[in-house]
Image: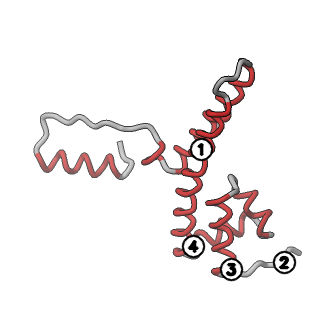
Amino acid sequence: MARKTVFSNGLAEDICTLIASECDSMSEVAQKVGVGESTIWRWLNQYPKFRDDYLKAKEMQATRLADTAITVARESLGSESAAEVAAHKLVVDTIKWKAKTLVPGIYGDKRELKVSGLTHEEALDLLDEVSEGGE
């Protein structure tokens, strides 16, 4: 039988620090802190402060990934090898995809809304719906 791990604020802080600073996946975080991945997911549902801190850590992770993408892109400057440039492009595109899934409002594609023929109230309602993720 597996040992039950007890939640602590210190462990939650360690998890968030790893997400923000070095780990790219929950499985990697779980392995480093010695806790099952499903346990971390359960804690995110049970502890609102941990969930809020986790979401902030994911935003910081996205920024770290964007910085990494810039570094990788710069490494390919001046390369005469098409294969090397293609490999760098694949890495950058993958990092960009991950960053925009983590924080679509910052790293995602921009959405434009054009409205005509609506009353002021209808336009505000539509804007609220779009900003909440509705279509």
For the N terminus, the quadrant is bottom right
* Badge 3 or badge 4: first in the primary sequence: 3
Residue 108's spot in the image, x, y percent?
A: 47, 41
How many residues crowd mark 3 within 10 Å: few (<14), some (14–19), many (20+)?
A: few
Residue nearest the viewer, comparing 76 with 52: 76
Q: CA distance from mark 4 to mark 2?
A: 22 Å
For the point 73% across and 61% down, the residue is 29
Q: Within the image, what quadrant is residue 14 found in?
A: bottom right
Q: CA distance from mark 2 to mark 1?
A: 33 Å
* Badge 2 or badge 1: first in the primary sequence: 2
* Badge 4 or badge 1: first in the primary sequence: 4
Look at mark 1 in the image and give the residue it sits on: 98
Residue 114 to residue 8: above or below: above
Look at mark 3 in the image and give the residue it sits on: 7
Residue nearest the viewer, comparing 59 with 81: 81
* Front: mark 2 or 3: 3
Q: Amino acid at mark 2?
A: Arg
Image disc number at residue 40:
none
Image disc number at residue 50:
4
Q: Amino acid at mark 3?
A: Phe
